Image (tube, rainbow, N blue to C red):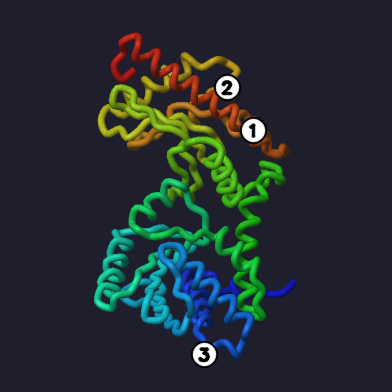
């Protein structure tokens, strides 16, 4: 098996280095050194420019700088365009960094009468809700799927280029293979693949990684109901389908017990709701669960997405009706 450079160079800085290296090949001075790589890089620069601007008729100069003003990748094209790239692998934006970077780029372009293009490039998957937040910060999102499609469509004579492309392809395959793999063999990537498949087919609140002392897990929040100022919701926790309440800061035990009684008392037997193995006492508390084998499938089975969506919809409809009935009967906070 051919070793892949990016199986060893796994940090975000390595991805920064590849993108910077690749974009610098778009400069005309590189045309005779490796024509195929130069053409690919030039096309990539045009694709990025097209996200928020009209590319120039010809590319006469490309200058790439890393970590200018803490911006991951700074690309000057001719004297007419600036592309700033916030490059992510698995982490997300934080501390208002995108607004700061946009302001830096905007000021630089104003002084030079240039057009600004802001790109948020991430090679791990993210939820639609988080991507919408990126767009609200005036950054265009460029996904792993888009980048992989570009690299697969254009051939370039370079081991570095093909290694990076193959790395992205492996990541993409790791999240799409869940549909053909026994559920008992799933890892975090398979759960991410499932969550994306659900998100493509029905409304959800959000999905992402929850870091905790037990090691963390991938979760998906399906809904969020306002029930007399308490917020019940359904969440998949890389296994069980959990019925939860949050955010609760007072009388946690009483509220937790009340919602547990409400759901367990109104659930038909075929729904197979169970008491959690242990009750938590945090701001977000699980009050009932449905085991993975019931809502998703047994470990030796392959998932049936249509059936799963139908079961989730049924649980959601039942929960909504149970909460509405409780309000109609005049109960206050259960």
Q: Secondary structure at mark 1?
A: helix
Quarter of the image with the N terminus is bottom right
In-front residue for pair 305/106: 106
Taking the image as shown, residue 180 lies to the left or right of residue 293, namely: right
Residue position for label 3: 29
Observer able to see residue 41: yes
In-front residue for pair 71/147: 147
Rendered view: 165 above or below 30:
above
Residue position for label 2: 272
Q: Position of residue 39 (x, y in %)?
A: 59, 79
Taking the image as shown, residue 44 lies to the left or right of residue 139, namely: right
Instruction: State which tag comes first along the sequence, 2 or 1.
Output: 2
Quarter of the image with the C terminus is top left
Q: Residues within 10 Å of mark 3 (few under 14, many from 20)?
A: few
Instruction: State which tag comes first along the sequence, 3 or 1.
Output: 3
Mark seen at residue 120: none
Residue at 46 percent of width and 14 percent of height: 265
Residue at 54 percent of width and 35 percent of height: 240
Q: Secondary structure at mark 3?
A: helix
Instruction: State which tag comes first along the sequence, 2 or 3.
Output: 3
Mark seen at residue 306: 1
């Amino acid at each position: 098996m051919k070793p892949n450079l990016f199986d060893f160079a796994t940090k975000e800085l390595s991805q920064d280095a590849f993108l910077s290296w690749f974009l610098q090949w778009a400069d005309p001075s590189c045309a005779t050194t490796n024509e195929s790589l130069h053409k690919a890089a030039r096309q990539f620069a045009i694709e990025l420019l097209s996200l928020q601007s009209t590319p120039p008729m010809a590319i006469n100069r490309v200058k790439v700088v890393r970590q200018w003003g803490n911006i991951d990748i700074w690309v000057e094209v001719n004297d007419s365009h600036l592309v700033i790239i916030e490059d992510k692998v698995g982490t997300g934006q934080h501390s208002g960094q995108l607004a700061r970077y946009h302001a830096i780029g905007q000021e630089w372009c104003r002084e030079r009468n240039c057009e600004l293009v802001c790109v948020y490039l991430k090679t791990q998957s993210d939820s639609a809700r988080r991507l919408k937040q990126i767009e609200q910060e005036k950054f265009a999102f460029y996904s792993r799927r888009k980048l992989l499609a570009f690299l697969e469509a254009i051939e370039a004579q370079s081991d570095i280029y093909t290694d990076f492309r193959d790395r992205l392809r492996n990541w993409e395959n790791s999240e799409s293979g869940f549909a053909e793999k026994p559920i008992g063999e799933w890892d975090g990537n398979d759960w991410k693949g499932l969550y994306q498949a659900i998100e493509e087919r029905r409304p959800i609140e959000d999905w992402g990684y929850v870091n905790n002392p037990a090691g963390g897990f991938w979760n998906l929040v399906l809904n969020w109901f306002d029930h007399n100022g308490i917020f019940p919701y359904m969440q998949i926790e890389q296994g069980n389908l959990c019925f939860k309440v949050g955010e609760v800061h007072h009388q946690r035990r009483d509220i937790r017990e009340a919602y547990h009684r409400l759901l367990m008392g109104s659930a038909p037997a075929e729904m197979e709701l169970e008491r959690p193995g242990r009750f938590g006492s945090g701001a977000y508390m699980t009050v009932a669960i449905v085991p993975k084998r019931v809502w998703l499938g047994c470990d030796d089975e392959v998932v049936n997405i249509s059936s799963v969506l139908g079961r989730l919809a049924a649980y959601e409809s039942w929960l909504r009706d149970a909460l509405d009935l409780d309000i109609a009967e005049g109960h206050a906070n259960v």
